Amino acid sequence: MISAALALVGAIVYGAADFLGGLAAKRLRSIVVTCIAALSGLVALAISLPLLGGVWSTADVLWGVLAGLVGVAAIALLYACLAIGPMSILSPLTAVVSAIAPMLWGLLVNGDTLAPVGYAGLAVALVAVVLVGFIPGQQIVRPRPRGLLMAVGAGLAIGAFLIVVDQTSAASGLVPLVTSRATSFVVTAAIVGILALIAVRRGRGAASVLAVDGAPLGATPTGHADLEHAGTTGIDVRITRTRAWWLAVVCGVTDAAANALMLVALRAGDLSIVSALTALYPAGTILLAALVLRERVAAVQWLGLALALVAGGMLALA
């Protein structure tokens, strides 16, 4: 099934965007990275819209705006839960919930029907999501109830993004993604502006809001996060402020491409299948880290990558 292949490729591209956003977040505040990425993604989608076509309708525009608001909510909950920690538990939990929520919606509300191999593939995909989301070296401690609730909320918000986008009409083309990204940019730019105003009133320059503040968590406009490479990895990655800006720009364009792949996959196939495979986005981050940063991939992550391929094949047959 072409939708399974597109969803799996889209997950890899999402992971690449997260990797770039994580590197940019070494020198820029996470919300600033998200704002820059939202703007560059918006520009990329706006340029592509006339080429690919799309009918503007009130319903599709409103669905796009709602998707943008849901994406911002996902980012807020993601930052909050990861600041509480531990990432080693809350990260996979968020990814699993982000897969299960739209998966159940597709099966129970949309009425998606799969062959037996498809249902087995969904189970394999969920196991793969947990394994590829594993963070080597993170100390496992008991999470706080508030952190667990926020992680579940972040996962539900990410899943809701897929559900909302799935409601748009095929004739709309990229219109819902354009309005979604525009909404994300307006909201995040407003947040950055408020932070700058607060900084000025406290006697600091407006530019001070650009610097990393608190946990350096890189995120894309749809609420995914690169947890391993936004903080200290023990690897000397020389990221200048200028390079961080460019990384954030490329992050946004890459994320927009992933969204486009996800949109085509949704319109060509079932929400349950696309959501399960899209949640495998950490695979892209892992592969880029191994290729670019020469990081060692843990055995459990290799197992997760292998299961992701198996799940993709099984779901393609569903």
Image: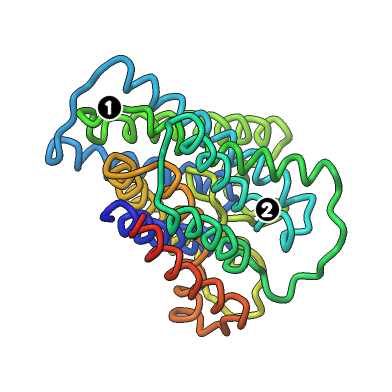
Residue indicated by mark 2? 93
**Above/below status of 13 relative to 55:** below
Q: Earlier in the sequence, mark 1 or mark 2?
A: 2
Q: Is residue 107 visible?
A: yes
Whole-percent x, y for residue 289 in the image: 50, 75
Q: Amino acid at mark 1?
A: Ser
**Above/below status of 124 relative to 111:** below
**Above/below status of 232 relative to 263:** below
Whole-percent x, y for residue 223 in the image: 54, 45
Whole-percent x, y for residue 92 in the image: 65, 58
Could you tell me which residue is drawn at 40 percent across and 63 percent down? 314
Q: Would you call the spot at circle 2 few (<14 residues within 10 Å), some (14-19), or many (20 or more)?
A: many
Could you tell me which residue is drawn at 62 percent across and 62 percent down? 130
**Above/below status of 185 relative to 24:** above
Q: Observer-nearest residue: 42 or 275? A: 275
Q: Secondary structure at mark 2?
A: helix
Residue sticking out furthest to the left: 51
Residue indicated by mark 1? 169
Q: Amino acid at mark 2?
A: Leu
Give the quarter of the image for residue 317: bottom left
Quadrant showing the C terminus: bottom left
Q: Is residue 188 visible?
A: no
Could you tell me which residue is drawn at 50 percent across and 71 percent down? 307
Quadrant showing the N terminus: bottom left
Whole-percent x, y for residue 308 in the image: 47, 67
Residue sticking out furthest to the top: 58
Which of the numbered marks, if any, corresponds to residue 157? none
- Side of 140 where 288 appears, left or right: left
Q: Secondary structure at mark 1?
A: loop
